[in-house]
C-alpha cells in the first residue's frame, strides 16, 4: 500500500474518475484537479457528458484496446451483480447491416467473439434492406447518473477535488504559475495538498491537445452529434450499418425513458453545436432503421416531426492517432522530476475501456513510484 504518497489526477471525466478511484483503492492519497465535474452543466470541453453509452467492442485488431475493453466488461458485470442499484444495466442489442463487406464481417466476427450470447440473425428476422445481422446482450450505461455515481464513490472513499483550468501540468506544482483553486464540491472543506506529488496522472481527454507541456499533436476530435429522445417503450439497442458507411445507433437509458439516437463520426470537426441538416438526417435515418422510435399510434406516416426530441447534443470524442496513450513520461520542474502517467485519447470507447485503462494506469503508477523508492 502507498498510504503516504500524494497522487494528483487531472481530469474528472469517466477516465479520470475511474482512475482516481482505482488509485485510492491502491492506497494512494488522491486529489483530482479539473475544469469540469459531473455536477456541472454539460460542456463541450468534457466528452463524458455526451456519450450514449454502451459497450460494443471496436478493438478488432488493437490488442491493447481489446484487453482494456474486456477488463472493463468484466468489471461492469461484477458491479451489476454486487451493486444492483448502479446505473449500468445489461440489455439486448441488435446489429443490422445493409451490406456485408469485409469491414463489417471483421467487426461482426469480433463482436461474436466478445459477447458470449451472440447469435447471427436468421434471414427471416432481418428487416427489409438488411442483409445480415446479429444479436447479443451487452452493457448500457446511464451516463449522467453513472458519472455522479463515480464522483460520489471517489469523494466518499476519501478523495479530494479542486476546480481549476490548468495551462500546463507544471503549473500544478509551481506556486507562481498555479491558477487559483476552488474546492469541489464548493461546500467541502478541502485543504490544499502539499503540491509535491509522487506522480501526476493525466486524464485530460481532448484537453491534452492544449496542455502546455504535453501538447499531443496526435489528438483530434471526432465530432458526435446525437439526439436524446423520450421513448420509454424502447427496450433494446441497435446499430444499423448503412450501405454508404453511415451508422445509426440507438441506446436506451435506464428509468427515465430517455433514448439516445445517433449519430455522426466527424474527424477533426470542432463545431460545438448541432447543425439543422444533420439533425434532420439523424431523424430520417433513425425512423427508417428503428421505426419503433416513433410513439405508438404515430408510426404509420413515418413523420420525423412525430419523434419526441428532448435535446440536440454535440460531443467531441478524444481520438488519438496510434490509439489510447497509456505510458509514463517525466517532467522536471525546479530541478525536481515528476513521473506523469498518461491515460487519455480513448476516442469513442472511453466508457467501455474505462476500468481497464484505470487498472493499467495504476499499475504504471505503482511501477514508477516503486522505481523511485
Ligand atoms: C456522441 C458520443 C457518443 C459516445 N458513445 C460512447 C459509447 O457508447 N461507449 C463508449 O465507451 N464511449 C462513448 N463515447 C466516448 C466517450 O465519451 C469518451 O471516450 C470519454 O468520455 C473520454 O473520457 P475522458 O475522461 O478521457 O475525457 P473527458 O470526458 O473529455 O474528460 C476530460 C476531463 O479533463 C478535464 N480537463 C481537460 N483539460 C483540462 C485542463 N487544462 N485543466 C483542468 N482540467 C482539464 C475536463 O474538464 C474533464 O474533467 C462517446 C462520445 C460521444 C461524444
Image (spheres, rainbow, N blue to C red):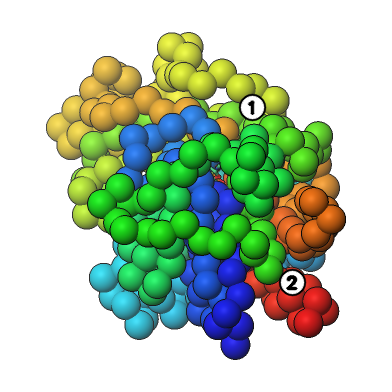
Q: How much space separates mark 1 and mark 2, taking CA atoms? A: 32 Å
Front-most of residues 317 and 300: 317
Percent of width and height locating residue 103: 75, 46
Left or right placement of residue 255 versus residue 334 in this view: left
Identify the residue shown where x is 38% and y is 50%: 183
Front-most of residues 204 and 269: 204
Front-most of residues 152 and 106: 152
Percent of width and height locating residue 78: 44, 80
Neighbour class for label 2 at 10 Å: few (<14), some, many (≥20)? some
Front-most of residues 223 and 242: 223
- Please say whether residue 136 is visible from this viewpoint: no
Which numbered disc, 1 or 2, marks the residue closer to the eye?
A: 2
Vertical order, 258 against 282 (above or below): below
Vertical order, 132 against 220 (above or below): below
Residue 266: mark: 1
Vertical order, 302 against 109 (above or below): above
Q: Quadrant of residue 212?
A: top right
Residue underneath mark 2: 364
Amino acid at each position: 500500500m502507498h498510504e503516504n504518497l500524494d497522487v494528483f489526477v487531472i481530469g474528472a471525466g469517466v477516465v479520470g474518475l475511474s482512475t482516481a478511484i482505482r488509485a485510492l483503492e491502491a492506497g494512494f492519497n488522491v486529489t483530482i484537479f479539473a475544469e469540469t465535474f459531473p455536477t456541472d452543466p454539460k460542456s463541450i470541453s468534457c466528452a463524458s457528458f455526451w456519450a450514449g453509452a454502451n459497450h460494443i467492442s471496436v478493438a478488432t485488431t488493437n490488442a491493447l484496446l481489446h484487453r482494456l475493453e474486456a477488463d472493463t466488461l468484466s468489471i461492469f458485470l461484477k458491479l451489476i451483480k454486487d451493486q444492483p442499484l448502479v446505473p449500468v444495466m445489461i440489455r439486448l442489442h441488435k446489429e443490422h447491416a445493409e451490406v456485408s463487406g469485409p469491414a463489417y464481417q471483421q467487426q461482426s466476427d469480433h463482436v461474436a467473439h466478445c459477447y458470449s450470447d451472440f447469435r447471427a440473425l436468421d434471414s427471416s428476422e432481418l428487416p427489409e434492406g438488411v442483409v445480415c445481422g446479429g444479436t447479443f446482450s451487452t452493457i448500457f450505461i446511464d451516463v449522467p447518473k453513472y458519472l455522479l455515481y463515480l464522483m460520489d464513490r471517489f469523494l466518499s472513499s476519501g478523495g479530494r477535488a479542486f476546480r481549476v483550468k490548468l495551462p500546463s501540468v507544471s503549473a500544478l506544482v509551481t506556486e507562481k504559475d498555479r491558477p487559483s483553486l476552488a474546492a469541489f464540491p464548493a461546500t467541502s472543506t478541502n485543504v490544499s495538498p502539499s503540491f509535491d506529488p509522487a506522480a501526476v496522472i493525466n486524464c485530460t481527454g481532448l484537453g491534452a491537445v492544449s496542455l502546455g507541456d504535453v501538447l499531443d499533436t496526435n489528438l483530434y476530435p471526432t465530432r458526435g452529434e446525437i439526439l436524446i429522445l423520450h421513448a420509454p417503450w424502447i427496450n433494446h439497442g441497435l446499430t444499423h450499418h448503412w450501405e454508404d458507411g453511415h451508422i445509426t445507433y440507438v441506446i436506451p437509458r435506464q428509468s427515465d425513458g430517455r433514448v439516445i439516437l445517433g449519430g455522426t463520426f466527424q474527424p477533426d470537426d470542432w463545431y460545438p453545436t448541432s447543425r439543422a441538416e444533420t439533425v434532420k438526417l439523424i431523424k430520417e435515418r433513425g425512423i427508417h432503421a428503428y421505426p419503433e422510435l416513433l410513439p405508438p399510434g404515430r408510426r404509420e406516416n413515418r413523420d420525423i416531426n412525430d419523434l419526441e426530441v428532448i435535446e440536440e447534443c454535440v460531443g467531441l470524442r478524444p481520438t488519438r492517432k496510434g490509439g489510447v496513450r497509456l505510458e509514463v513520461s517525466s517532467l522536471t520542474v525546479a530541478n525536481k522530476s515528476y513521473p506523469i502517467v498518461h491515460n487519455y485519447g480513448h476516442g469513442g470507447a472511453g466508457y467501455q475501456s474505462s476500468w481497464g485503462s484505470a487498472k493499467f494506469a495504476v499499475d504504471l503508477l505503482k511501477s514508477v513510484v516503486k522505481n523511485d523508492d
